[in-house]
Image: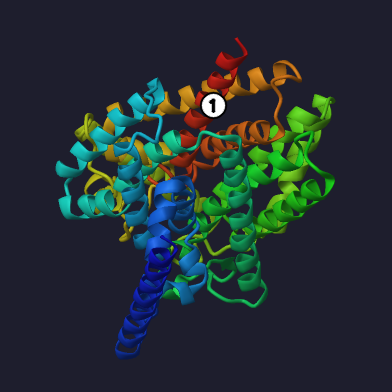
């Protein structure tokens, strides 16, 4: 028996060495780092089966925070595509093996109806090719990730991993933003900072960059202001929040500025007893922030010399066009990512340029119709209700309280508020933040209900 085991070990060692030599030979012939990564394939398969949530979280980091565009050296590795395949494989295998506890809720039902409506609208879009590209490249991934996060995010350790990951990604993005601002890199409209504009990054739009930065801001403040968190963690979170805050100011995005004011205002309201002090100081602080952001120095719009009044009128014209689109297509809209393509046909004030809608609500209205907007608003309302219920349960007694879960619940509430405020001036209807919040809110509500059931 002992001799047989030794023979098996020798055989395994020989096979391993032969595989290593084969990979080395292929790597020598094809000098691509992707060949070397094949060696990690067995470990990745095991990881995907045993720990699907980290894969899901990594996919969100690269898809939403665009880490491969912040660090262009990672771009040739095609990490988002690889993570997407790994996440789908992991989710499929774990569903088949029944390792994932599947549940359905009213919010997932509303989201499913909305997703079906968006899909139907893409097929009926005025520019079907544009709509289908957006549906397949982005929104289909969002649909899968909403269900994946809702089902996979189920333990305290995973909620802790989520909040830490969001904070660290916010730190990386804000540091890169401030570096570009200090060194006058990737600027647009004279003074507005971006990331990766020269390589066509999504973060090359200052409004989109401010949107990405807004998301981790709520997690930072929530973790910093939650009792039971260690002092050094609180200090770190406050410092990271200040970096994110400064980076949002550097983008000179009005929507981003309103969003960060909403986040700060919510936590101030929760933690400062004198409400009149908040009401008195808030207008003064807003004026100070506008001055610090340098909004008066912005060269707004596509044309130099367009002042703030012209930019504001441009938004009103775009919103009017969105309403006209919904009137003509009340049930399905003009189709996802079709607003700009239809602007000329529905705008009553043509200035020679197509304009972005610059509003989540009017964007949803134009691209999914009145029906889509009603369902979208219903989803937001349900998320606020779930968030309030979760916070109410956690605050009820010290027995229910858990710093990690409570910080997540506060971050969700702050994220929803900042989305509603900044979303009035930023186009966020088909981007990651609200859908991540949707999934995390559902997962947190399910976790809290399980805890409540165990107590009874």
Image quadrant assignment for residue 77 = bottom left
Q: Which residue corresponds to the image point at 47% horizontal and 45% vertical from the top-left?
A: 53
Image quadrant assignment for residue 415 = top right
Specify whether 351 is left or right of 119.
right
Name the foreground residue: 253 vs 418.
418
Number of numbered discs visible in the structure rendering: 1
Indicate the position of residue 220 as horizontal and vertical percent values.
68, 46
Indicate the position of residue 430 as horizontal and vertical percent values.
37, 44
Q: Is residue 10 above or below residue 331?
A: below
Res 309 visible:
yes
Q: Which residue is mark 1?
A: 447
Res 279 visible:
no
Q: Give SS at disc 1.
A: helix
Q: Which residue corresponds to the image point at 62% horizontal and 14% vertical from the top-left?
A: 455
Image quadrant holding the C terminus, namely top right
Name the foreground residue: 383 vs 314.
383
Q: Identify the image's colour scheme: rainbow, by chain, secondary structure or one colour.
A: rainbow
The residue sitting at the top extreme is 456
Indicate the position of residue 108 as horizontal and vertical percent values.
37, 28
Image quadrant holding the N terminus, namely bottom left
Name the foreground residue: 25 vs 110.
25
Image quadrant assignment for residue 406 = top right
Q: Which residue corresponds to the image point at 16% horizontal and 50% vertical from the top-left?
A: 128
Name the foreground residue: 154 vs 221.
154
Specify whether 383 is left or right of 94.
right
Indicate the position of residue 135 as horizontal and vertical percent values.
26, 48
* Crowdedness near tag 1: few (<14), some (14–19) or many (≥20) residues, C-alpha within 10 Å: some
The residue sitting at the bottom extreme is 29
Q: Is residue 127 above or below residue 177?
A: above
Q: Which residue corresponds to the image point at 56% horizontal and 35% vertical from the top-left?
A: 155
Specify whether 408 is left or right of 33.
right
């Amino acid at each position: 028996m002992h001799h047989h085991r030794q023979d098996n070990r020798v055989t395994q060692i020989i096979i391993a060495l032969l595989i290593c030599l084969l990979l080395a030979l292929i790597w020598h012939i094809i000098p691509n780092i992707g060949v070397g990564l094949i060696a990690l394939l067995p470990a990745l398969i095991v990881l995907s089966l045993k720990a699907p949530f980290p894969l899901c979280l990594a996919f969100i980091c690269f898809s939403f925070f665009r880490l491969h565009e912040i660090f262009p050296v990672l771009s040739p590795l095609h990490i988002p595509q690889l993570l997407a395949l790994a996440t789908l494989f992991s989710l499929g295998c774990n569903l088949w093996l029944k390792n994932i506890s599947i549940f359905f809720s009213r919010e997932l039902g509303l989201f499913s109806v909305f997703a079906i409506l968006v899909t139907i609208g893409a097929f009926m879009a005025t520019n079907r090719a544009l709509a289908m590209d957006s549906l397949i490249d982005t929104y289909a991934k969002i649909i899968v990730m909403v269900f994946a996060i809702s089902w996979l995010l189920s333990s305290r350790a995973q909620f802790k991993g989520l909040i830490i990951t969001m904070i660290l990604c916010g730190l990386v993005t804000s540091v890169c933003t401030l570096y570009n601002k200090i060194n006058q890199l990737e600027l647009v409209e004279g003074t507005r900072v971006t990331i990766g504009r020269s390589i066509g990054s999504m973060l090359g739009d200052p409004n989109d960059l401010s949107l990405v930065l807004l998301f981790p801001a709520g997690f930072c403040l929530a973790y910093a202001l939650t009792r039971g968190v260690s002092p050094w963690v609180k200090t770190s979170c406050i410092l990271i929040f200040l970096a994110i805050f400064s980076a949002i100011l550097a983008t000179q995005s009005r929507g981003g500025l309103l969003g960060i004011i909403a986040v700060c205002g919510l936590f101030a309201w929760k933690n400062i007893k004198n409400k009149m002090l908040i009401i008195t100081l808030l207008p003064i602080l807003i004026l100070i922030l506008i001055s610090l952001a340098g909004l008066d120095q912005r060269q707004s719009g596509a044309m130099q010399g367009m002042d703030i009044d012209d930019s504001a009128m441009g938004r009103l014209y775009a919103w009017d066009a969105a309403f006209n689109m919904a009137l003509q297509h009340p049930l399905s809209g003009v189709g996802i990512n079709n607003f700009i393509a239809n602007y000329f046909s529905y705008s009553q004030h043509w200035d020679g340029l197509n304009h972005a809608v610059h509003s989540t609500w009017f964007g949803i209205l134009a691209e999914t119709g009145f029906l889509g907007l009603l369902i979208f608003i219903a989803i937001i309302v349900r998320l606020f209700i779930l968030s309030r219920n979760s916070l109410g349960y956690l605050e009820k007694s010290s027995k229910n309280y858990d710093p990690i879960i409570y910080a997540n619940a506060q971050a969700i509430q702050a994220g929803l508020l900042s989305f509603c405020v900044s979303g009035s001036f930023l186009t966020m209807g088909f981007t990651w933040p609200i859908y991540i919040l949707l999934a995390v809110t559902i997962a947190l509500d399910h976790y809290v209900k399980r805890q409540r059931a165990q107590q009874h």
